[in-house]
Amino acid sequence: MRTAALLRPLFVVAFVLCAASCDRDAAEVKADARPWTPGMNTPPPAAEPPQDSWIAIESAEGRFTQKFPRAPKTERAMVPTAIGEIPQTTIAAEVEGAYYAATFADYPASLVAQTTPEAQLDGARDGSVANVGGKLVSERHITLEGFPGRELTVSVHAEGQSIEMLQRLYVVKERLYQQIVVYPVGQTPEAARFFDGFTLAR
């Protein structure tokens, strides 16, 4: 009730101002009765939609495009696996304490022919969790343009800090793609936007 009582005088003032100005506006309209011409009373152009501040990085070698919240850096290294070392390319950026990365690595065709994509994903999942000394919290089967994948949530405790790692893995023929978002627990990274920003080259 107190709020309504405070607002009532504003309605009264608005009505008085309108009543006092309506006659004046009508007189001004009569005095300014100019013929209509094109362009008169044209509304201003609609504001352009905000530009996407994320940067689309196209990897010709990796045959994919990934959007990042800022310009990333590219690193190449030999990484240990159950079949020996293989070359892996990592494109990554760090923003406000959150780490965003897209990686790809090619496995020998002869080895891929002896296994299945699901078995490869199982191995990639187990290796990823073991490499960070983490605990698998959740796992979900996903696909990308018909290729099989997994979405993982991994909990990590390092140097007294609780960290969460969100990861998507895809097997595309002989290639393993990974999307990784790592951040301190309590922070809210734009993981969904990052994951949705990945597309394979046509």
Image (tube, rainbow, N blue to C red):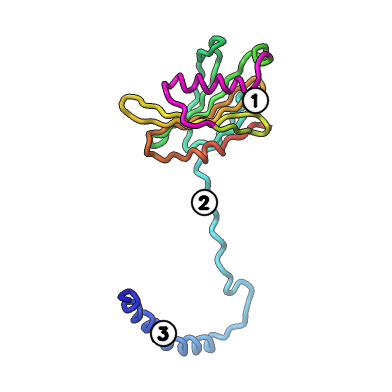
Position of the C terminus, as image quadrant, is top right
Query: Which residue is drawn at the image coordinates 48% and 34% (left, top)?
Result: 71
- The label shown at residue 15 is 3
Q: Earlier in the sequence, mark 1 or mark 2?
A: 2
List x then y, in percent, for residue 103. Answer: 54, 25
**Amino acid bearing label 1:** Val
Residue 84 sits inside the magenta stretch: no
Q: Nearer the viewer, residue 143 or 7?
A: 143
List x then y, in percent, for residue 79. Answer: 51, 15
195 lies left or right of 165: right
Identify residue for label 1: 172
List x then y, in percent, for residue 34. Answer: 58, 83
Query: Which residue is drawn at the image coordinates 39% and 30% (left, top)?
Result: 163
Query: Which residue is drawn at the image coordinates 67% and 22% (left, top)?
Result: 173
Q: Can residue 100 be seen here?
A: no
- Please state the extent of the stretch shown in magenta in the rendering: 114-139
Q: CA distance from mark 3 to mark 1?
A: 69 Å
Q: Helix, strand, or loop for circle 1?
A: strand
List x then y, in percent, for residue 168. Answer: 54, 30
Q: CA distance from mark 2 to mark 3?
A: 38 Å
Q: Nearer the viewer, residue 10 or 155?
A: 155
Q: Is residue 47 above or below residue 92?
A: below
- The label shown at residue 50 is 2
Residue 201 found in image quarter: top right
